Amino acid sequence: MDKIEAQKRIIKLRSEIARLRDAYHVKNAPNVTDDVYDSLTRELKTLLQKYPEFNDLNAPENRVAGKPLDKFIKVKHKVRMLSLNDVFSEEELYDWEKRIKKLLPPGKTLGVKGSQTPGVGEGMNYFCEVKFDGLAVSLIYENSKFIRGATRGDGFIGEDITENLKTINSIPLILNKPFPAYLEVRGEALMSKKTLIKLNLENEKEGKQLFANTRNAAAGSLRQLDPNLAKERHLDFVAYDLISEGLVKNSPAFALGDIGQGTHGSLNSLPNLRLHSEKHDMLRHLGFKVEKLEEKCKNLEEVIVFIKKFEKIRPDFPFGTDGIVISVDDLKLQEILGVVGKAPRYMAAFKYPAERATTVVKDILVNVGRTGVLTPLAVFDPTLVAGSTVSKATLHNMDQIERLDLRIGDTVVIEKAGDVIPKVVEVLIRMRTGKEKKFKMPTSCPTCGTKIEKKEDLVASFCPNPKCPAKNERYLEHFVSVFEIYELGPKILRRFKDEGLITDAADIFTLTKEDIAPLERFGEKSADNIVKEIENKKHITLSKFLWALGILHVGEETARDLAIHFGTLEKMMSSARTTLAEINSIENIGPAVSKSLHEFFNEKNNLNFIKKLEKNGVVIEKAEKKKAGKFTGMNFVLTGTLSTMSREIAKEKILNLGGKVVGSVSKNTSYVVTGAEPGSKFKTAEKLGVKILKEEEFLKLLK
Ligand code: IVH
């Protein structure tokens, strides 16, 4: 066979193999035996070995799913994967604009008047695109090849799901020319509404659990360790952002012109992208699927027109969506606006009003949470709202019940937005018959009977019993979810507890295959999976460890702030047990948190629990040492308004140089940076003789 014949044969083989695969996986109607299929595949492989020039990385044979994995490997994102701040109304959208306009240094406006950006009309401000409801993923390409894909995880560290992502046809395995030498593409992995219906029909037939929505189905599929299973789910991918080398660290925008040297076909420098919308054009060119429905808007009025237009199409849109993403289109302005907390200031997610439904409250139950807080729940017949069926809604606390004037038997309006637990928003008083009954909060814990207490800093009532079984159950669920031990769902945890296999969360880490396998409905394989997963999840970061402890008022963000400040558990504990001054000085941490930490770390049972976790193999990974810089060991306090940058940006710059930013001035403060109209911190600094820096001096120091 000569080269030309070989090429023809390769093309034929490819298309026939693709057809057979489709018949097998999609239509569920294999028309040849496996042997025939295998033999064609073998022939193709042999030919390609002989004529490697006909290798096509985007061809179906290269999407053959790899081997099942034991676990997903963690990967660190080069640039943090952020979230978006939501806006729920036109009014909130205008408030967002007002806030960001204020942050722009004098002289800059949101519009690109007089256009700094060639090709962009005067006053072009925003870019609108669909907000897909799937799973955020990051894809890495080196010299045009797809080398790794990962989940968002906590934004800093995700899981390597490359093999599963390779099974998605809309993810190019090789980029179109010209391409940058290094590229990260971000987007959403999705399951179409049609595919979900099909999958659920099959699952129903086989008595398997149904997926509540397309997002859960997409996430569940990508969490399969066996890529062959992921492949059968026919996922899709839409791209919405790209990041390339030359990226200015910690800056949302970056100089795409700085991309490093590429190999044949790559660009030494990409055309300088100046707009978010140009990134989308570039993504299309590189071979990604980017949603057609997007629009540049001159002002918020145009944005609102887009939002209304999409609202009409939304029910028939092929993918699940939960809003519109609005970006300041100009990348330079994005850079100036920066990021605050987990989300960029230059983007907002407009969420369509939550769907509402009415139902009759049959009863009010009281749930005991992991910190012992009692939450009343309204119970009703299964009701369809926002695409899923619910039968409970949170009532938060007694104050809320009184505010709503809710009684058992009332007809109520419930509301559910996306993933959020439904809530009761209104009582339809006119529907009353007179038979409705008032509800009283129990005076003793519905699970263990202990007398309920009220904390002065909480509206809620809570069960003070450390051994309360309900509290412990919720705590176990929280604990395994922070440790990401997905194999241990609430039912399994309860079972293990009932069987006496575990008494607390630390016992999870000593479970063996022999403990689990004999239990009815478990068996060798699932026991093995559980034990393997637990083993794999023993290493945890300090911030997650603190979060997992379930300390009152210490959520994910606070735990992260504490971990960054202290670096080790020992330092954090000794500080919390003795003086609270250091904890109180950390920005964003208030007295309620420090009080709670003080109580927690002075309780012998808690200290024993931590010791037991460590004894049972839990390892707190050393927090990555922050890069040392010229501010290492220095504490800064910021006061007043700076004219050249926002407070958040100033803080970021200090952190990047190794310094710390604290909330209050003490004699240990290295510098107090003052802007216009400084507060009392300025006076304290003067009194204590702490060095005060004016804005210009601070800017010099940063250089
Ligand atoms: S922009 C700054 N564009 O929404 C991070 N995100 O709520 C947002 N999402 O984690 C990137 N569609 O998974 C962007 N067209 C879109 C999006 C989108 C869906 C998701 C994304 C992100 C989440 C934030």
Image: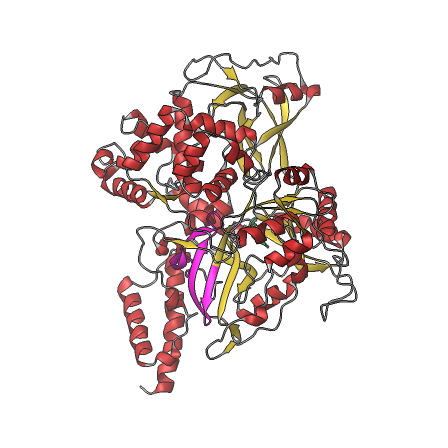
Residue 252 visible in the current orientation: no
Residue 220 among those drawn in magenta: no
- Along the line of sight, the residue nearer the viewer: 242 or 572: 572
Q: Is residue 504 above or below residue 145?
A: above
- Along the line of sight, the residue nearer the viewer: 300 or 306: 300
Residue 149 among those drawn in magenta: yes
Left or right of 226: which side holds 291? right
On-image quarter of the C terminus:
bottom right
Whole-percent x, y for residue 146 in the image = 44, 66
Left or right of 233: which side holds 86? right
Q: Residue at x 71, y 20 (%)?
A: 430
Left or right of 230: which side holds 559? right
Q: Which residues are magenta?
A: 139-167
Q: Residue at x 55, y 57 (%)?
A: 250
| Residue 639, quarter of picture | top right
Q: Is residue 47 above or below residue 519?
A: below
On-image quarter of the N terminus:
bottom left
Q: Report the number of discs.
A: 0
Whole-percent x, y for residue 672 in the image = 62, 45
Q: Is residue 20 above or below residue 455?
A: below
Q: Residue at x 69, y 55 (%)?
A: 644
- Along the line of sight, the residue nearer the viewer: 99 or 305: 99
Q: Residue at x 37, y 63 (%)?
A: 21
Whole-percent x, y for residue 244 in the image = 53, 65
Residue 120 visible in the current orientation: yes
- Along the line of sight, the residue nearer the viewer: 104 or 460: 104
Whole-percent x, y for residue 579 in the image = 48, 30
Q: Is residue 504 above or below residue 671?
A: above
